[in-house]
């Protein structure tokens, strides 16, 4: 599922920011899309913590091979050593199993998420062991399709902004936020195009 706002966001970002206009043109006709499954998105986000997109995809494919049916119950029942053999740390295995328990026990009211604003939903998600702000932000972007999320701690976003906006020199978060002001209310879309500028394969969780 592609966000209904995507075309509007493209048009407005292209007008507001000439660098973003170039990145949008270079990316072609691809767009952000949701897998439609909350558990899978959160599990993939946990797997992707603090490693490259390429490394995360490699580990995830091994997890799929080990556990072909990615559900909370199936992952919870998976052998810990087998998951470790996929390239997951002991910590990430424990995070995934804790996440699984939240879905199995129906701790969350998923129906209420659509009514919650970004910060309220982030605050709920980070109560789970292993879900920090970055993981929650990936969930908002890739599952909830929220249009205006700026994941300041994302290494890929930081690299891309330094590359395109500061001749490849590092920028602090305050400056990144100031640059991102011109993307309002489409920070998620701008972030997605910045990721694409580093890797032609669409980022997906």
Image (cartoon, helix red, strand yellow):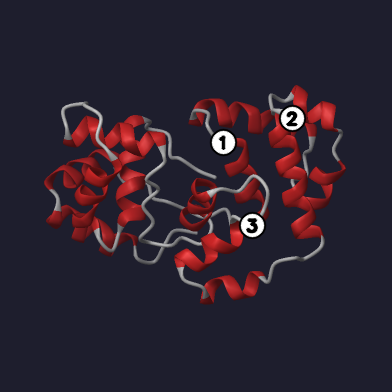
Question: Of the residues under marks 3 and 1, which one precedes in the sequence?
Answer: 1
- Image location of residue 16, percent across then percent down: 14, 56
Using the image, tell me which numbered label, if any, was put on residue 127: 3
- Image location of residue 184, percent across then percent down: 25, 61
Q: Is residue 81 visible?
A: yes
Q: Left or right? Give the position of 27 relative to 145.
A: left
- Image location of residue 137, percent across then percent down: 48, 52
Label 3, secondary structure: give it. Answer: loop
Using the image, tell me which numbered label, if any, was put on residue 48: 1
Task: Determine whether 97 is above or below 111 in the image.
Answer: above
Q: Left or right? Give the position of 42 relative to 193.
A: right
- The Cα atoms of the two marked residues, 3 and 1, are separated by 19 Å
Q: Nearer the viewer, mark 1 or mark 2?
A: 2
Q: Nearer the viewer, mark 3 or mark 1?
A: 3
Does the CB distance between marks 3 and 2 fall below 8 Å? no
Task: Determine whether 187 is above or below 88 in the image.
Answer: below
Q: Left or right? Give the position of 3 relative to 12.
A: right
- For the residue pair 60 and 160, the one nearer the viewer reads as 160
Q: Residue at x 46, y 64 (%)?
A: 119
Q: Toward which corner of the image does residue 12 lie, by quadrant?
A: bottom left
Question: Of the residues under marks 3 and 2, which one precedes in the sequence?
Answer: 2
What is the crowding at mark 2: few (fewer than 14 residues within 10 Å), some, or many (at least 20)? few
Q: Residue at x 50, y 59 (%)?
A: 1
* Quarter occupied by the C terminus: top right
Question: Of the residues under marks 1 and 2, which one precedes in the sequence?
Answer: 1
Q: Toward which corner of the image does residue 76 lie, by quadrant?
A: top right
- For the residue pair 94 and 23, the one nearer the viewer reads as 94
Using the image, tell me which numbered label, if any, was put on residue 90: 2
Q: Residue at x 45, y 40 (%)?
A: 203
- The Cα atoms of the two marked residues, 1 and 2, are separated by 14 Å
Label 1, secondary structure: give it. Answer: loop
């Amino acid at each position: 599922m592609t966000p209904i706002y995507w075309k509007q966001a493209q048009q407005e970002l292209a007008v507001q920011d000439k660098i973003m206009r170039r990145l949008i043109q270079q990316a072609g006709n691809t767009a952000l899309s949701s897998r439609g499954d909350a558990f899978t998105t959160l599990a993939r986000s946990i797997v992707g913590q603090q490693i490259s997109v390429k490394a995360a995809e490699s580990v995830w494919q091994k997890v799929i091979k080990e556990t072909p049916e990615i559900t909370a119950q199936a992952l919870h029942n998976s052998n810990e050593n087998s998951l470790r053999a996929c390239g997951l740390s002991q910590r990430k295995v424990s995070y995934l199993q804790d996440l699984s328990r939240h879905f199995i026990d129906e701790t969350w009211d998923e129906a209420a998420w659509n009514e919650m604003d970004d910060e309220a939903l982030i605050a709920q998600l980070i109560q789970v062991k292993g879900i920090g702000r970055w993981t929650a932000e990936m969930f908002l972007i890739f599952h909830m399709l929220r249009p205006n999320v700026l994941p300041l701690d994302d290494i890929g976003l930081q690299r891309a902004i330094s590359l395109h906006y500061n001749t490849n020199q590092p920028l602090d978060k305050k400056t990144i936020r100031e640059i991102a002001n011109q993307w309002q209310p489409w920070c998620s879309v701008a972030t997605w195009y910045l990721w694409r500028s580093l890797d032609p394969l669409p980022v997906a969780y």
